[in-house]
Amino acid sequence: VLSRCDHPGIVRMHSSGLVGRLLFYSAESIPTRSLGEWIREQGRLDVQGTAKLLRGAASAIEHLHGRSVLLSDITPESLGVNDQGDVM
């Protein structure tokens, strides 16, 4: 399912498989850090910066939900942010 997701806020999955009992996947490599790390580096965010992050996260989550993917652990540490401040 994730390999068919095409959204700027979602890392693209290339392939996945099962070897014995080991599940693996490969995904594109994007330089990111967690949203929590990014906020600690940037300090307090203004309203516009906060709104940009929330819009990006909500858009990506909506895209996944539209493909029947449910996220259950959405925290600042589980969201990535790229160098431009976009949620990935």
Image (cartoon, rainbow, N blue to C red):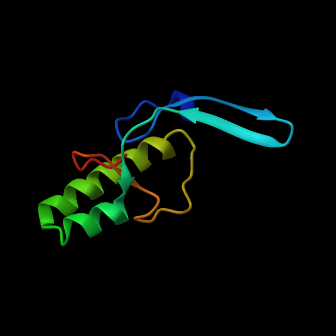
On screen, residue 65 versus residue 42, left or right, reads right
**Residue 1 appears anywhere in the view:** no
Q: Nearer the viewer, residue 31 or 65?
A: 31
- Can you tell which quarter of the image residue 6 is in? top left
Q: Residue at x 34, y 36 (%)?
A: 8
Q: Residue at x 63, y 36 (%)?
A: 25
On screen, residue 46 versus residue 40, left or right, reads left
The location of residue 69, given as percent across then percent down, is 57, 45
Q: Residue at x 59, y 33 (%)?
A: 26
Q: Residue at x 30, y 49 (%)?
A: 56
Residue 49, placed above or below residue 19: below
Q: Nearer the viewer, residue 48 or 29?
A: 29
Quadrant (top left, top right, bottom left, bottom right) of the C terminus:
top left
The location of residue 1, given as percent across then percent down, is 60, 34
Which residue is situated farthest in the bottom direction here? Answer: 44
**Residue 38 appears anywhere in the view:** yes
The location of residue 57, given as percent across then percent down, is 35, 52
Q: Nearer the viewer, residue 84 or 7?
A: 84
Which residue is situated farthest in the right direction here? Answer: 20
The location of residue 59, given as percent across then percent down, is 34, 46
Residue 35, placed above or below residue 84: below
User: How many marks are shown on the rendered structure?
Assistant: 0
Residue 74, placed above or below residue 55: below
On screen, residue 25 versus residue 63, left or right, reads right
On screen, residue 17 versus residue 37, left or right, reads right
Q: Nearer the viewer, residue 6 or 44?
A: 44
